[in-house]
Amino acid sequence: MAIFLFLCLASVVGCAQQTESDSSTSITATNIPDQAKPTQQEPTATPQPSQTPTYILSVEDIIATLPTQTAVPTENKSDPFAVTFPTPLPTDDLAWRPPLYEIPWAPGPHDHFYFYRPIAVNTVNWPLPNYRYGVTFFGPDIVHSGIDIAAPRGTPVLAAGAGRVVWAGTGLYFGIYNPNDPYGLSVVIEHDFGYEGSQLYTVYGHMDRIDVALGDELDTHDPIGIVGDTGFTTGPHLHFEIRVGLNNFFQTRNPELWIAPPQGWGILAGRILNERNGPIEKLEVTVNSLDSRRTWRNYTYTMLGIKSDPYYQENFVIGDLPAGEYQVYFTYEDQNYVQVIEINPGVVSFFQFQPNAGFTFTPPGDAHTFTAP
Ligand SMILES: [Zn+2]
């Protein structure tokens, strides 16, 4: 089976969003229309991730900055699954973030937010909202093995954690020098820390320039190069991967479960299964904030060459959600499903769905703990 990659995009984003919404306005991470911007000024003294933040925005502060939109599904009281969906709103990611939690951020035994973002907080340092981990975009067999950060060309790329350079150059996918390698100029760091006995690696792709060499010892935030568009990409951005256990293309995990979230914000992880307990692939899932009326949209993983977290066994993640109540909805086999879920600050909020069982909230890792002897 030919398994291809991944990566890319930036200039394609506008196109992708046009196809996902009926909005005539193209919205990208760097092109948020004025009416979609929070009314609050962006923090003027944006702290670097290594600094102890001097302030924290409360959930109320965050919510107060969000514009009001009006489209939410309306429930038919006679049938809990019969939901009339509104006209879809554009997926409009927020154009700012509070300071990040300090790494290693692990409020619970199964949390492992061990990394900072590889781009400083003074520019875009969050994943492209419509080309997240596990998503196909360029073809049915081309699954995204990481996240893309649409920082401008030349933006310094920073080590997400301390470690040693184990790859620096062109040829990461093929394993040897190859000018046509899809990762372009890339760096891999083997970190000084692991997780549950497994070595951790981070991958930085498409750089225009590399400033480190094989064997270099790095501290968190050390610059390793600059954002570019080398390799298989349609425009400048950073492709960022987490690999667990082995420095291998088939050992990736969802970076949104490994990078520290903004303070007061959380992560939604879902395990969306079919009648036979298998993951439903490529399912469009919409997440709508009941506080701000803001909408996020993502697809369930295509399970081809990528891995879920052993504890959550998720196939759907949206990170960087301001804490609050959200309505999660999707259509599966002509049936509409909806569930209100609380996103708590700094942690993963988990749901599982099966057509016969509906929504449940115990991660499979916990369920296994309680099997009878
Ligand atoms: Zn990518």
Image (cartoon, grey):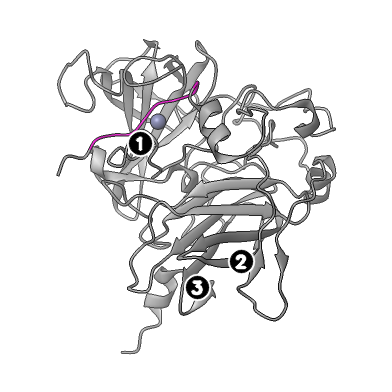
126 sits left or right of 271 in the view: right
Give the mark nearest the N terminus, 3 or 2: 2
To which quarter of the image does residue 86 belong? bottom right
Q: Would you say residue 10 sits in the magenta stretch?
A: yes
Image position, residue 311 (x, y; %): 40, 63
Q: Which mark is residue 366?
A: none
Q: Which residue is mark 3?
A: 362
Query: Observer-nearest residue: 238 or 81?
Result: 81
Indicate the secondary structure of the residue bearing disc 2: strand
**At 29% across and 53% down in the image, what residue appears?**
197
Quarter of the figure with the C terminus: bottom left
Q: Is mark 3 within 8 Å of ligand 1?
A: no
**At 44% across and 25% down in the image, what residue appears?**
9
Query: Observer-nearest residue: 97 or 182?
Result: 182
Magenta range: 4-11
Q: Quadrant of ligand 1?
A: top left
Query: Observer-nearest residue: 329 or 171?
Result: 329
Residue type beneath disc 2: Val
Indicate the secondary structure of the residue bearing disc 3: loop
268 versus 96 height, above or below: below
Residue type beneath disc 3: Thr
Looking at the image, can residue 128 be seen? no
Image position, residue 268 (x, y; %): 56, 55
143 sits left or right of 336 in the view: left
Image position, residue 293 (x, y; %): 75, 50
Q: Which residue is mark 1?
A: 191
Q: Which mark is residue 338?
A: 2
Give the mark nearest the N terminus, 1 or 2: 1
Give the mark nearest the N terminus, 1 or 3: 1
Q: CA distance from mark 1 to mark 2?
A: 40 Å
